[in-house]
Amino acid sequence: MPSREPSAIPTTISGTVITLDRGALPDNSIVIVTLWNATTGNSTPVARIKFRAKGQQIPIPYALTYDGSVIDPGQEYVLAGEIDSAGRGIYRTNSSIPVITQGNPADDVEIVLEPIR
């Protein structure tokens, strides 16, 4: 009998993206939220969402869906975020945000972005 791969378990992390300066975003802004496995240091993200802000201003809600079957409860997972405009970064996180495992949240996770100078 052939072995079966475990099926994906769609799971979601949600919250808002904010900026420290609360500056107005350009109309062409793109919001990027990435989930990383901090334990392995793997350069491939667990999941990523990229969407146009479409003129929306801070705070911007997000919902990042990932495959829950790949999450190891004994490992640490973190979120990072950024906002790009016209192909260049204008905001990003300066530190990763622990999520999902080890008592860390998966709902109402605020991603604080700082201006890129």
Image (cartoon, rainbow, N blue to C red):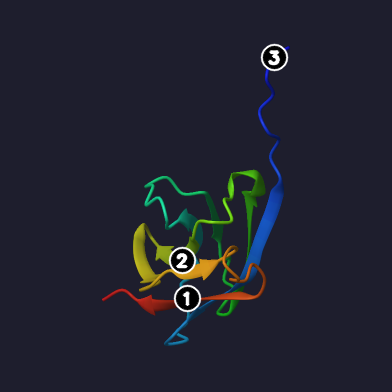
Outermost residue to the bottom: 21
With 109 as the anchor, is 97 left or right in this view? left
Q: Could you tell which of marks 3 and 1 lies nearer the N-terminus?
A: 3
Say few, some or many: other residues with alpha carbon within 10 Å of mark 3 (under 14 / 14 to 19 / 20 or more). few
Point 60% across, 63% down: residue: 100
- For label 3, the residue is 2
- Mark 1 lies on a secondary structure that is loop
Q: Do the residues labelled 2 and 3 touch (CB within 8 Å)?
A: no
Q: Position of residue 87 (x, y in %)?
A: 36, 57
- Mark 2 lies on a secondary structure that is strand
In the depicted structure, whether residue 85 falls above or below residue 17: above
Give the quarter of the image for residue 60. bottom right
In front: label 2 or label 3: 3
In front: label 3 or label 1: 3
In front: label 1 or label 2: 2
From the viewer's side, name the closer residue of 23 and 99: 99
Q: Where is residue 96 in the image (x, y as percent from the top left)?
A: 42, 69
Q: Could you tell which of marks 2 and 3 lies nearer the N-terminus?
A: 3
From the viewer's side, name the closer residue of 107 and 102: 102
Q: Are marks 3 and 1 in contact (CB under 8 Å)?
A: no
- For label 1, the residue is 25
- For label 2, the residue is 81
Q: Where is residue 11 in the image (x, y as percent from the top left)?
A: 69, 54
The amino acid at mark 3 is: Pro
In the depicted structure, whether residue 117 falls above or below residue 66: below
Q: Could you tell which of marks 1 and 2 lies nearer the N-terminus?
A: 1
Say few, some or many: other residues with alpha carbon within 10 Å of mark 1 (under 14 / 14 to 19 / 20 or more). many
Q: Are marks 1 and 2 in contact (CB under 8 Å)?
A: no
